[in-house]
Image (cartoon, rainbow, N blue to C red):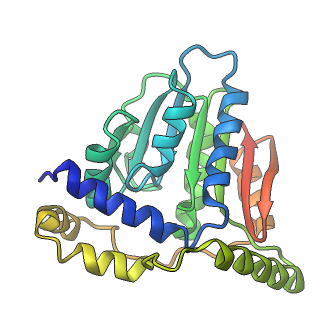
Amino acid sequence: MGVSMATAEYWVDRWERQQRRYAIGREERFSVIADVVEYVTRDRPAPLLVDLGCGPGSLAARIARRVPRAGIVAVDRDPLLLELARTHHADAARYVEAELGGTGWIDALGIDRAPDAVLSATALHCLPVHALALTYRQAAALLRPGGVLVNADHFPDDDARGADLAAYVGSRRMASALAGDEPDWESWWREAARDPELADAFAARGRCTGTEDGPGNDLSLADHVRLLREAGFRSVSTVWQYGESRVLVAFA
């Protein structure tokens, strides 16, 4: 398995454009995550970061540019996306194939010290509730004291009126930002599957369990805060929000 840089660049660019359909203020969110990392690692000469659900390396690449002294271990369950990351963003992180909440994924990281931050962007909503709760508990146990979990994702309010309003505001912001030629999730995968250079990666993906779309979760902000506190995090704060999109920071 292996893809050329040109192919990886093409499909990662298509991925970036596709993701703009689903992540409001995506670049701003990435910048906020980097701000948090800079702050919590300001006294750490060589911070260690773990990127959960890294996909083709979008978050890892941006954090590596902003905090070049950091070491990043990026984990995902999808061998195709990891192949794109290893080719296109090879210097940003060390990439690990493992399923969050699955057996042995912490050991698969291959780290010898507690990380300063565990990061995720628009990924953890894909986990079923039991796997998310377990991942939060494992992250809390993994982090150094004072370390943080940073999760940028969709966190609707419990109140239906507030949730509906936030979703509307977000959809208006997103519509105004789209260029009009962004592929959607289904078309990205459909088109990529026709690229002969990705055939081996798709075959590896087909042999893996856990790469198919699962039930995910639609937990509210309050649900996430509860799960994070139950996992052992001392405090949870929203440091950025637009509509129902938020960046949550939980302190170990």
For this orientation, the residue located farthest to the front is: 179
Q: Is residue 40 above or below residue 213?
A: above
The quadrant of the picture occupied by the C terminus is top right
Q: Looking at the image, can residue 218 be seen?
A: yes
22 or 150: nearer the viewer:
22
26 or 160: nearer the viewer:
26
Q: Residue 7 placed where, x, y %?
A: 21, 58
Q: Residue 2 placed where, x, y %?
A: 14, 51
Q: Residue 175 placed where, x, y %?
A: 65, 79
Q: Looking at the image, can residue 78 be seen?
A: no
On screen, residue 144 versus residue 126, left or right, reads right
On screen, residue 165 versus residue 141, left or right, reads right
Q: Is residue 74 above or below residue 189?
A: above
> Residue, x 40% and y 76% (percent of image)?
213
Where residue 224 sits, quadrant-wise, is: bottom right
Q: Is residue 204 above or below residue 106?
A: below
> Residue, x 61% and y 35% (percent of image)?
117
> Residue, x 78% and y 71% (percent of image)?
243
194 or 151: nearer the viewer:
194
Q: Residue 25 placed where, x, y %?
A: 67, 62
251 or 23: nearer the viewer:
23
> Residue, x 71% and y 28% (percent of image)?
40
